[in-house]
Image: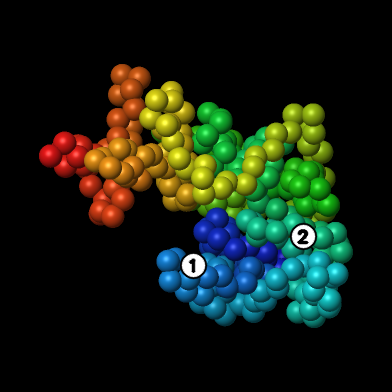
Amino acid sequence: MPEIKFTFFGTDTFSILVLNELKSAGFLPTLIVTMPDKPKGRKMILTPPEVKVWAEENGVKFIQPKSLREDKNPGIENEVRSFGADDLFIVASYGKIIPQNILDIPKHQTLNVHPSLLPKLRGPSPIVSAILTENETGVTIMRLDAEMDHGPILAQKKIEIPEWPPYAETLEKILGQEGGKMLAQIIPDWIAGKIPGIEQNHSQATVCKKIEKTDGEINLSDPADLNLRKIRSFHAWPTAYYFQKHKDKNLRVIIKKAHMENGALILDRVVPEGKKEMDYSDFQKGIKN
């Protein structure tokens, strides 16, 4: 088939996983739209999004608009159009709502890779929310419309996960790679008009919330299964932690690894406040001494 000039909207690790699969299949974007650089870490060093780094490494043109809304960023529609990458738009974990006038630019509309079994878990945190609330998940390719994760489904696949609940990074890698492969497989048929799309059953839709830093705090008295889900879903960010009394202060203890044993939660590796990562048993010995 002729070369497809497409624009890719994405920002983080999930986006990179999809991009790598597209590249392996011979689909390299003409333009990448990603988020602006942001201060990170304790020293608040200005850091580029992962997708910007990928674009530079692969020689792909990119822009980093603060907003895609014409009222907040006049001329942004014309800027996007100016690159001529308007055969197709692809979105994978971009991080912002894309307004309808931008979605309407490409000849073959805008497709989205969403890491859940839509209509379940619409919204900003489907991977983490699946670990917290579900016992299975998958990936969906859909056509974007003006509403959040609402458009017709072009392809969907339930993913078998060997151990549930998985750690968030593990699940993200599996879903990102599988989503990228699915997308690459359907692009030719989509361009050829061979995929009609199936409307979602909106009555079964669920919506997940944005994860906040404070969501990582756990109470060790809560059910073991719930806490294990939190530890594994929040592993990368915001991390799962609890407070342990020691002498005259409450120590913040980050839980890095845990498992279930005979229905009980067993902590394996922790990072106590002001310390390096260690075995939980060693931490407890130090607390008692």
Q: From this viewpoint, which residue is outermost toward the front? A: 248
Tag 1: amino acid: Lys
Residue 241 in the image: state x and y as whole percent: 39, 42
Numbered disc 1: secondary structure:
strand
Residue at 83% from the left image edge and 78% from the top image edge: 75
Find disc 2 in the rendering and name its residue: 98
Tag 2: amino acid: Ile
Q: Which of 169/117 is in front?
A: 169
The answer to whether residue 173 is above or below residue 45 is above
Numbered disc 2: secondary structure:
loop
Asked which quadrant contains residue 134, the reply is top right
Q: Answer yes or no: is residue 34 visible.
A: yes
Task: Return the mark for residue 40.
Answer: 1
Q: Which of 138/239 is in front?
A: 239
Residue at 23% from the left image edge and 47% from the top image edge: 278
Q: Nearer the viewer, mark 2 or mark 1?
A: 1
Q: Is 200 on the left-hand or right-hand side of 283?
A: right
Residue at 28% from the left image edge and 55% from the top image edge: 274
Task: Return the mark for residue 121.
Answer: none
Residue 257 in the image: state x and y as whole percent: 33, 41
Name the quadrant of the N terminus: bottom right
